[in-house]
Image (tube, rainbow, N blue to C red):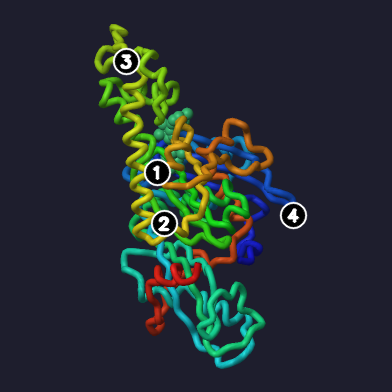
Amino acid sequence: MHRHKPQTKPRNGLVAALDIGTTKISCLIARQEGTRPPRVLGIGHHASAGVRHGAIVDMDDAEAAVRAAVGAAEEMAGTNIHSVNVALSGPVFKSRLVAYDIGIAGHEIGDQDLRKILDASRLASELPEDQEIVHSIPVGYSIDGNRGVRDPRGMFGDRLGVNLHVITASTNALRNLDTCLHRCHLEVENRVVGPYASALSALVEDEMKLGVTLIDMGGGTTNISVFFDGELVHADCIAVGGVNVTNDIARGLSTPVQHAERMKTLYGNCMPSPSDDLEVIKVPLIGEEQTGETNPVARSMLVGIIRPRIEETFELIRERLNSAGFEKLSGPRIVLTGGASLLPGVREMAGSILNKAQVRMAKPRYLEGMAEASSGPQFATCAGLIYYALESTGELAGRTYRPKDQPASRLGRIGQWLRENF
Ligand SMILES: Nc1ncnc2c1ncn2[C@@H]1O[C@H](COP(=O)(O)OP(=O)(O)OP(=O)(O)O)[C@@H](O)[C@H]1O
Ligand SMILES: [Mg+2]
């Protein structure tokens, strides 16, 4: 669908992104002048704190970590920021497809009709009270019941229908995030669900058009977005990530967590290989750090601990995609981002469990001024926030959402609609 210019231009060309992850917090400050591509001026990273499975659980700790990451980026950029585009991940958001129509009495459809039908406030009465709209993305229009209309402007009809992909998030989680940012003297410019942001920096347009599932494998969460016909049609999150793998290793081998993390990144693999039994790793034992006592462990044992967890994660994703009706619509292709996707063997396992022939590991699209150290798959979400802010995708973002007293709209769940249409 048509992508157009942002509705709110970043102030004086500066645009800032903040990704509050479970293991690290990243901040990017970029500037865009004219039609030139954005240039990164400041980068700040800090170990995360007060965040579990993507959600803030300790306000003081989270505030300190956000301040540190933002402060580092500001120092490098030589300027202060007042507002940020922030990512939402963790099981706080819900994705649904809804359809409704309005009467247009036979006149030529124009912008005012689109504004009317896309007015997110009409959805308010249909939403659970503890949820707020974060994204509401038109994924297709119909005129007098004829579906498959991409842009209804300039056409005539009696009824204009729209299919909207609405993503809501828990009001309390949003409030916690806002509070944390306010404490850091930051306003929210846009809230973007993490897997949407990751997709904007990691996917190419053809992938979005042909159908693709992006899986962002983070520390405490695994986030999913599905694109079809160029639009985000589904998003989901499960509360499992690389931290769970590390904890499994620590428990399984009785080794401190930081050693488990190191072993995972140095020797970890989720696919077994014949030489694994011959390779022996020295594993420091918990409580024996002083004596330096280690335990010899075959690499096959490490692989045996990692594999079931990754398998389980992809099986969960498969179940979630299937139960949402996306087993076929999730496209022929998988794209992986997030730090946990760096584990060797993950690509093969994703392909075999999700039954997709094409699996690609992705890094964020190149941003001028981005340091090499910040260009890995862990930074796809943060980089994607910059793209989101700069090339708003023609949706009505949550910030325009103001509940009004409107008569209940004719709104229904339409998983059915997708099956009929694609
Ligand atoms: N080379 C590697 N091999 C295996 N795992 C790795 C590697 N590098 C990083 N990881 C894992 O990636 C995870 C962190 O990924 P990432 O930075 O994307 O998460 P996050 O954004 O902080 O968390 P989330 O998105 O879940 O809130 C950690 O669990 C880490 O162990
Ligand atoms: Mg992340």
Q: Are marks 2 and 4 in contact (CB under 8 Å)?
A: no
Q: Amino acid at mark 3?
A: Val
Examine the image and state in which quarter residue 315 appears: top left
Of the numbered discs 4 and 1, the one sitting upstream in the chain is 4
Q: Which residue is mark 3?
A: 297
Residue on which disc 2 sits: 327
Is 334 on the left-hand or right-hand side of 77?
A: left
Cα distance, mark 3 to mark 1? 28 Å
Q: Quadrant of ligand 1?
A: top left
- In the image, residue 208 above or below residue 253: below
Residue 250 image point, x, y percent: 30, 25
Q: Assess mark 4: CB under 8 A from ligand 2? A: no
User: In the rendering, at what x and y percent does residue 296 appear?
Assistant: 31, 11
Which labelled disc corresponds to residue 35?
4
- The first of marks 3 and 2 along the sequence is 3
Disc 3 residue crowd, few under 14, some 14–19, many 20+, Cα 10 Å = some
